[in-house]
Image: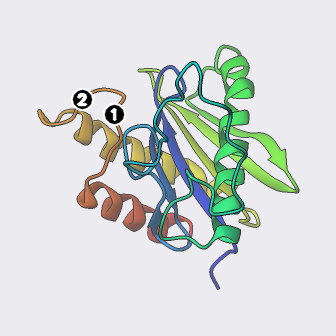
Amino acid sequence: MAPKKIIFAIVGEGDVPIFLVDLSTGQVRINSPRGLPRGSRERPRGPREPLRSPSPRRHECAPPHLPQRDASKAWLDQMVLHASLDLVDDLKWQQKEPYLRTVDRFNDTPVAAYVTPGGVTMLVMHDLRGGEDALRPFFAEVHEVYLKQCLSPFHRRDTAITSPAFRDKVMAAARKHLL
């Protein structure tokens, strides 16, 4: 039986989202380097233009493939993961190991972290029961896959990873260790 929710994120230096995927569904949530779909930003307002009131339509930054209700949950998950980065910054200097275990909780959903020697943070928000032992080998395998991605001459540091092969390898590691 698959758990309700497993969200995996890779965050680069400067808290730049590199990769975000819902491992329970296999749905990648980052569409562009900044984490927003392309063309979602409004044109800048001129100095004499009045402020426009927000319309009741879809949130402009919501991924186009998610309904509005699911989109708000997706942004909440992303916010929780990024909020736990402050705790990771404090803990990474206190522990010698890269695997930091559970660093934060939100509504009884733990957030586990892994910090690479290069400063990249991997986060998992999960509903696993007794999954702490399974997270360590998952993080180690994904770290190896991430290193291979970084060695590619076509990958630039702190840019979004959009490779389907990378996503497939992360999903395979999740099926092997978490699902």
Residue at position x 56%, y 66% in the image: 178
Image position of 170 with respect to 46: above or below: below
Q: Which residue corresponds to mark 2?
A: 156
Left/right placement of residue 25 relative to residue 144 reads right
- Counting from the top left corner in percent of width and height, residue 78 is at 64, 47
Q: Secondary structure at mark 1?
A: loop
The reply to whether callout 2 and callout 1 are in contact (CB within 8 Å) is: yes
Q: Are there few (<14), some (14-19), or many (20+) residues within 10 Å of tag 2?
A: few
Q: Amino acid at mark 2?
A: Arg
- Counting from the top left corner in percent of width and height, residue 114 is at 56, 36
Q: Quadrant of residue 104?
A: top right
- Counting from the top left corner in percent of width and height, residue 56 is at 72, 61
Q: Are there few (<14), some (14-19), or many (20+) residues within 10 Å of tag 1?
A: some
Image position of 95 with respect to 85: above or below: above
Image quadrant occupied by the N terminus: bottom right
Q: Which residue corresponds to mark 1?
A: 159
- Counting from the top left corner in percent of width and height, residue 84 is at 72, 35
- Find the residue positioned furthest to the front: 48
- Find the residue positioned furthest to the right: 107
Q: Secondary structure at mark 2?
A: loop
Q: Amino acid at mark 1?
A: Thr
- Find the distance from the CA under tag 2 to the CA under tag 1: 6 Å
Image position of 46 with respect to 67: above or below: above
Residue at position x 38%, y 48% in the image: 39
Q: Quadrant of residue 93?
A: top right
